[in-house]
Structure formats: C-alpha cells, structure tokens
Image: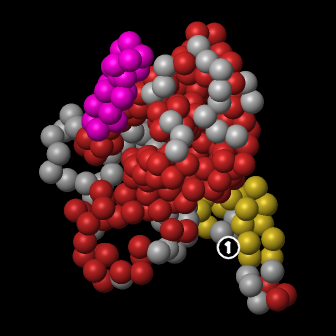
C-alpha cells in the first residue's frame, strides 16, 4: 500500500504544473567593492512599493472628484500625502507586531525568548495581514481625530485602495514560493520548491547558486497565493470601485470600508481551505485555521459599518 501511494504521488508530481522558478529579485547589484555585499531588489518589496504607490494614485483620483462624496472630499492632497506616510508606518509596525503576538508568542515563544532581537529583523520575514489592518485602523483613528475629518470617509478611501497592495503582495508570495497551498491532484496543482537553505529568504532559494532548491519529495499543491490575490485583492477592488463610480457608495460613509472588511474576511476564509496551514500552529479544530479565526473581527466590524451606513443619515454615528 505504501509503495502504491508513493507511486501515485510521484505520478501526480510529474503531471502537475511546474513552478516558474523566477528569481525572487528583479535585479541584484554587487556592492562588494565598497564592502556592502550584494543588494537584491526583491519582488516582495516591489509588491509593497507598487501597492502603496498604486493606492496613493487611486486615492487621489477619487479625492479629486468631490461629487463622489456628495459635494466635498474629506481630504486634500497634502493631508492625503501625510495619511499615506502614517499608513506605511501602521502597515509595518502592525504587521510585524501582529505576527509576533498572533504567531510567535503563542507558538514560538522559545525562539522569541532565545533571540528577542528577532522582533526587529523584519527582513527575515514574518508579517501578519490582520496585524497590519489593525495598525492601519489605529492610524486612521488618530489621523481623523487630529485633523478633525470624518473617520468613516477616510476609512472608505483606505478600504478601496488597500486591495491593490494585497493583490500585488500575494503575487509576490507566489514568486517567493511561500504560503503555498495544500496538496491536490487537480489539474491546477503545482510543484513548489520546498528545500531549505539556512539563513536564506525565501528559504528554498540558494542565492549563491542562483537557483531554487528542492527536497525531492515535493507533491503538487494549490497555488493558493494566486487564489488569495484574486479573492482578497482584485475582486474587492473591482466590486468596490464599481459601487463608488457607478452607485455613489461614498455618499454613505463607512459603507465601502465595511464591505472591504467583509469581502476580505470571506475571501480569506475561502482561500484558507486551499492554503497549507502554518505547521507550528496547533490546538485548533481541523476545519478552523488561524487566518479564519483572525478574520472574525473583520466580519463583525464590517457588518457594523454596513449597518450604520445604511441607516438614515440623521441616525448614523
């Protein structure tokens, strides 16, 4: 029976799609002549940079059309520039601290205790989206209170622009051969490199050899990063944009922000059924993952925002 399963696994792996094996970096520059080593312009970093740039551009296109808000935009260009700066801070600090609190403290405390400085080594990987969204929410609250602007309208801008970065970063996860899916025998199954190179990010890439490393026993898996790119990024972007440009959704502050939270929560929960759970996370029922659990507050918060936005104007918060 064991031999039969091994033969079947080998057959499925041979008939599966192959990982494209792109380099994790768009380009590499050797600064060894000045003692700085090699610099890699990575797709993962470019995903964040392009996502933030795309969010700024799209946000300005909306803010430059006050009629979308019913007469007056909540922010001018200078204020929006300031907001984007603080959103970047919120993404980085929230994403990193979220990973520490949600994943390392409960499940990898021994590693954290042995090397507390790992908290600062963000370049080694370890960002939690749910922590990032919490960091951005705190930034939006402080910004709106300090500037005296409508928090819900500012949240709407964040809600419709955030999917750009999410969609791009999920594609970058794919190019990094990380956060891949569960094993599958479906035609869309893909064999990802699952080797390990000590100290390397991503762990399956050998920078010295400029090549991906395979263990040899890989199986076909769902390319769940691409599912997430669509479900968490591009689909919400299209739907929310349609509601804004065709149906005037920004005239009901908080509606777009609430719909974004709901759509992300639904998309993430669906994708989690195809994504390989983190190996170190334990104690959850088989049908529940940490990603699903952390999405519950998004469902609840999104539902409240939608409920509030759909009430008569005089009864809204």
**The C terminus lies in quadrant:** top left
Q: Is residue 315 above or below residue 231?
A: above
Q: Residue at x 73, y 43 (%)?
A: 77
Q: Which residue lies most toward the right here?
A: 33
User: Residue at label 1?
Assistant: 208
310 in magenta: yes
Q: Which residues are magenta?
A: 296-317
- At 47% from the left and 48% from the top, the residue drawn is 145
Apparent side of residue 256 relative to residue 102 in the rendered image (left or right): right
Residue 143 vertical position relative to residue 314 in the rendered view, above or below: below
Residue 229 in view of the camera: no
Q: Is 231 included in the stretch rendered in magenta?
A: no
Task: State the residue at coordinates (30%, 61%).
Answer: 101
**Scheme of image coloration:** secondary structure
Residue 287 in view of the camera: yes
- Along the line of sight, which residue is nearer the eye, 46 or 273? 46
Q: Position of residue 287 (x, y in %)?
A: 21, 34
Q: Residue at x 55, y 60 (%)?
A: 89
Q: Position of residue 90 (x, y in %)?
A: 50, 56
Q: Which quadrant: the N terminus?
A: top left
Q: Locate residue 154 relative to residue 60 in the image: left or right.
A: left
Horizontal side, residue 1 vs residue 50: left or right: left
């Amino acid at each position: 029976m064991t031999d039969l399963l091994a033969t079947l696994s080998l057959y499925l792996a041979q008939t599966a799609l192959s990982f494209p094996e792109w380099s994790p970096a768009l380009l590499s520059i050797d600064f060894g002549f000045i003692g700085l080593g090699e610099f890699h312009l990575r797709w993962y970093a470019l995903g964040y940079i392009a996502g933030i740039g795309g969010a700024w551009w799209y946000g300005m296109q909306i803010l430059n059309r006050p009629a979308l808000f019913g007469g007056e935009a909540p922010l001018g260009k200078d204020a929006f520039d300031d907001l984007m700066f603080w959103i970047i801070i919120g993404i980085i600090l929230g994403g990193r601290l979220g990973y520490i609190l949600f994943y390392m403290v409960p499940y990898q405390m021994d590693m954290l205790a042995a090397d507390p400085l790992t908290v600062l080594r963000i370049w080694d990987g370890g960002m939690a989206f749910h922590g990032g969204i919490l960091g951005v929410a705190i930034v939006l609250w402080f910004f709106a209170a300090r500037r005296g602007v409508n928090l819900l309208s500012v949240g709407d801008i964040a809600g419709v622009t955030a999917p750009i970065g999410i969609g791009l970063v999920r594609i970058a996860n794919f190019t990094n051969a990380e956060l891949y899916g569960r094993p599958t025998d479906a035609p869309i199954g893909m064999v990802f490199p699952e080797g390990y190179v000590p100290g390397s990010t991503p762990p399956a890439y050998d920078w010295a050899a400029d090549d991906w490393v395979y263990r040899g026993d890989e199986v076909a898996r769902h390319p769940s990063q691409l599912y997430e790119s669509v479900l968490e990024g591009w689909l919400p972007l299209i739907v929310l944009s349609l509601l804004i440009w065709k149906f005037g959704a920004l005239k009901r502050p908080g509606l777009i922000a609430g719909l974004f939270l709901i759509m992300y929560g639904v998309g993430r929960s669906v994708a989690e059924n195809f994504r390989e759970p983190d190996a170190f996370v334990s104690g959850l029922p088989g049908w529940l993952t940490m990603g699903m659990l952390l999405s519950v507050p998004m469902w609840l918060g999104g539902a409240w925002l939608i409920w509030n936005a759909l009430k008569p104007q005089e009864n809204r918060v």
